[in-house]
Image (cartoon, coloured by chain):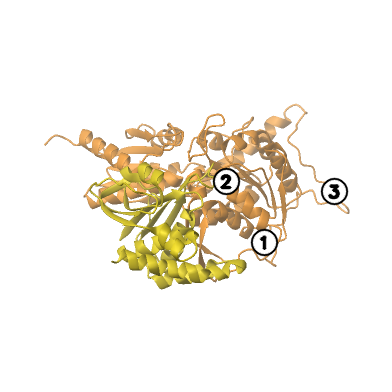
Amino acid sequence: MAKTKVLMTGNEAIAEGAIQGGCRFYAGYPITPQNELIAYMARHLLPAGGVFIQAESELAAINMVFAAAAAGSRAMTSSSSPGISLKQEGISYIAGAELPAVIVNIMRGGPGLGNIWPAQSDYFQATRGGGHGDYRCIVLAPSSVQEAYDLMALAFELADRYRNPAIILGDGMLGQMMEPLSVHSPQPTVHRKKNILPNKKWALTGCKGRKPNIIKSFYMKEGDLEKFNLRLQEKYKIIKQKEQRCDSLFLEDAQVILVAYGTMARIARGAVTKLREDGKKIGLIRPVTLWPFPDKVFKRLAISDKRLAILVIEMSYGQMLDDVRLAVNCQAPVEFLGRSGGGVPSEGEIINKVRKLLRTREPEN
Amino acid sequence: MTERIIIAGAGGQGIMLLGKVLSMAAMRKGKFVTWLPSYGAEVRGGTAHCMVVISDQEIGSPYIDKADTLIVMNKPSLTRFQSKIKDKGLVLINSSLIDKYPRGNSRLLPCPFSELAMKLGNIKVANMVALGAFLSQRKIVDLKDIFGVISDIAPEDKRGLIEVNKRALEEGAKYGSR
């Protein structure tokens, strides 16, 4: 496979990764800090044989994606926090209709209109469903421009495989920054001839010569909705079992394990490198899937080790913290460091917090 | 090697492009690079800055707390970022637009970027004069690597400007290494 390096923003890489991943329908409404994504789609999706629509609103965009997904297309939309809130009704309907679709959230500070600076404060919204009803979205959290690109194809694959919405959860910093990117083809937007879409027998493609397909999230008959929900829960159980993904560093001998995702994880990695140079036994767990949360990796840790402490770091005030606590299940102390509303915990702040933690935990000699 | 550079000036001074050209040249040398812009309500004449990190190793934070080098093209940028320079860091100052600068612990290099650009007949290349001066101090890439990037990214209707950009880089490098 030909590899060439280009310098791209995270937003552009996500758009390019989506096109390479087979996305052929995009509808969106502009919002900072993800505008480079919609702009890239506007320029490149048509030449790739796809459909691009700048919708009149976020509601229109998500419902267009709902329809395109029902028709069997690999469809996506993108926005930033306030815009994603507007899309929640549509996402709930997509989950209820068991359709595959990809939703990109380049998070900014909240609540309300908030500001345009990076944040991770939509973790609960993304991993707990977000709209009404008992549903879950698959949530992937890239931490570099390369990973943002690479995860797009995976998001479409998982969405198709499980007929479930998948969310890419990034932040303003990841969206805006440029990094070298290896693309799969030197002319990335050339339409692939090979049909990479799986056969979607359930799609609404015109029923001439076959039984009509029905796509709905409405169950009137007594007991039907409960049955449907139980089926959803079965599906979620399988996803939790099979699709946990995470990255880790130095877990073998770590006395403090940092847990962070996305942009926050790369800042934490910088802190780990510096602390290791100083002889401190620090490790890192970086969840790549936020739902399903990679709890298996925590269960494999030697949590009976009394010296071990866990430090969760977020650009929010303790959201992923809940999942880490559930995974650790009181087997080790779980500490927290977080800032939000545009504030980003720095490498220095992380190092200070870790040093303090080590001091309080060291037995007196 | 890790070099953290903050480039700041007025919107329209080519701040983003300066950072981008340097990042691309470093990328082509096989370095790890991050380029982080200021974004949002940015307008011509307002302030603009970008943060560039170039390293032999994977880069953690693209956001710079303490910079090895600060390149400032106008006065408000110096005021805003002078606290971000690390001890004994390098500060390249556009002396055409900044008359007073504090003597701190940093290594100051005042250089009339705008005037040198005007002498070349195009004030817009002040950014490339600054880049040339920077590279004379920090040999991260060669001038010819930058030439390569410029001629590759120049759009069809702007190819006439390649030459003056090259001369701006050379002028900056000459001034910087005096």
Chain of residue at mark 1: A
Q: Residue furthest right?
A: A208
Label 3 Cα neighbours within 10 Å, binned few <14 / some 14-19 / many ≥20: few
Which quadrant, please, contains the N terminus of chain A? bottom right
Looking at the image, which is closer to me, A304 or A154? A154
Q: Is residue B81 above or below residue A41?
A: above
Q: Amino acid at mark 3?
A: Lys
Chain ID for yellow: B
Q: Nearer the viewer, mark 3 or mark 1?
A: 1
Circle 3 residue = A211
Q: On what subunit does the disc labeled 3 rest?
A: A
**Mark 2 burial class by Cα count in 10 Å: few <14, some 14-19, many 20+:** many
Q: Specify whether B51 is left or right of A66.
A: left
Residue on which the image places disc 2: A34
Q: Nearer the viewer, mark 1 or mark 2?
A: 2
Residue B158 coordinates in the image, percent (x, y): 58, 66
| 3 and 1 marks in contact (CB < 8 Å) | no
Badge 2 and badge 3 in a common chain: yes
